[in-house]
Amino acid sequence: MIPFFRNLDDFLAFVELDIKVLSLNLSPNFPVKIPKAFAERIQKGHPKDPLLLQVLPRIQETRIAENFKIDPVGDLKKSPIQGLLHKYQSRALVVTTGHCDIHCRYCFRQHFPYAEESPNSQRIAYIKGYFEKHPEINELILSGGDPLSLSVKALKNWFDLAESMPSIHRIRIHTRSAITTPERISDELINVLKTSPLKHIWVVHINHTQEIDDSVQMALDRLKQAGVTLLNQSVLLKDINDDAHTLAQLSERLFDVGVMPYYLHQLDRVQGAQHFEVDENRAAEIYTELQTILPGYLVPKWVREIAGEPNKTLMSGGFS
Ligand SMILES: *Cc1c(COP(=O)(O)O)cnc(C)c1O
Ligand code: SF4
């Protein structure tokens, strides 16, 4: 059993913080969920810790801002079959589960109606039918929630589906669990990956160097040895990583542990997350500086997701 904190008092006692010094949202709609393995990487007694700020339900969540929406990226409009999102030509994303091991307070899917969107076996058959009609899809993306919350057996069912479709060449997994709960990278999972004939790409989600400890490094090593290509996406987050040196340090560390930086996301404007937004002018300054520090291959692409666009939209940093 993976240990989690779901109760704020227990969590605050663990990180040695007094509830009175924090302004908290004590009855959040998006419940508190913090894996113990992640909580262990938070500095004790440090109310501004960059990992703490990602999981702490602060009172600002209850602020309603008009331009922050329930479904900021237009996912629900782009779902041809429940549980399948085909927004971009060559790749389709399956919402495999609504569960995550961690509840990131800035998450753009925090209001997603998962009960309706998680596929059952009948929907899996429909999804297969959809792929048959859309041979332009050559990559299956397993997302969620977090696909690693599934059993290895359920995950393998998705691999089997992809492997049975000649048009599908790659399986991509979007996961934060590999980082938050590295115990999910089990021998059983590694064996399934090693025997799969398709190319596997995992896009992990790390926002700050402090998230990478020895257990994470070990899990990433095992994935690499199983032949998985590892990429990272981060979200640019106020007071957490909104600084060129913090981001540069992250890229350097990612490279050291065998992960290539992929995307740096401008925050999706989801209701309850406005206190995490770094405004675009400031973000452009940070990105411009980041480009001067790092070799080009360690600079993640700075992107924003705009509903209705055929791809993630590149933001421009640097001189114009
Ligand atoms: C982000 C996203 C993808 C993947 O986009 P890439 O640019 O290929 O990483 C695919 N489908 C959906 C619905 C997405 O939101
Ligand atoms: S792990 Fe990903 S999907 Fe889950 S809450 Fe965090 S950002 Fe959202």
Image (cartoon, rainbow, N blue to C red):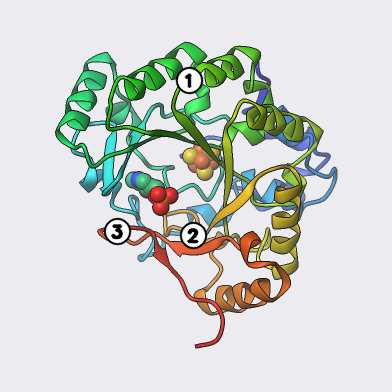
* Image quadrant assignment for residue 66: bottom left
Q: Position of residue 135 (x, y in %)?
A: 21, 37
What is the residue that sits farthest to the bottom in this orientation?
320
Q: Is residue 214 above or below residue 66?
A: above
Q: Position of residue 159 (x, y in %)?
A: 40, 21
Q: Nearer the viewer, mark 3 or mark 1?
A: 1
Q: Which residue is mark 3?
A: 307
The residue tagged with tag 1: helix, strand or loop?
loop
| Amino acid at the residue labelled 3 | Ala
The residue tagged with tag 3: helix, strand or loop?
loop
Residue 40 relative to residue 183: left or right? right
Separation of residues labelled 3 and 2 (CA atoms)? 13 Å
Separation of residues labelled 2 and 1 (CA atoms)? 34 Å
Q: Position of residue 265 (x, y in %)?
A: 51, 59
Q: Nearer the viewer, mark 2 or mark 1?
A: 1
The residue tagged with tag 2: helix, strand or loop?
loop
Q: Is residue 53 above or below residue 7?
A: below
Q: Is residue 202 above or below residue 209?
A: above
Q: Which residue is mark 1?
A: 196
* Res. 10 visible in picture: no
Q: Which numbered disc flags the more N-terminal residue, 2 or 1?
A: 1
Mark 2 Cα within 10 Å, few/some/many (few <14, many 20+)?
many
Residue 57 relative to residue 92: left or right? right
Mark 3 Cα within 10 Å, few/some/many (few <14, many 20+)?
some
Separation of residues labelled 3 and 1 (CA atoms)? 34 Å
Residue at 75% x, 41% y is 212
Q: Which residue is mark 2?
A: 267
Q: Position of residue 148 (x, y in %)?
A: 52, 25
Residue at 59% x, 30% y is 227
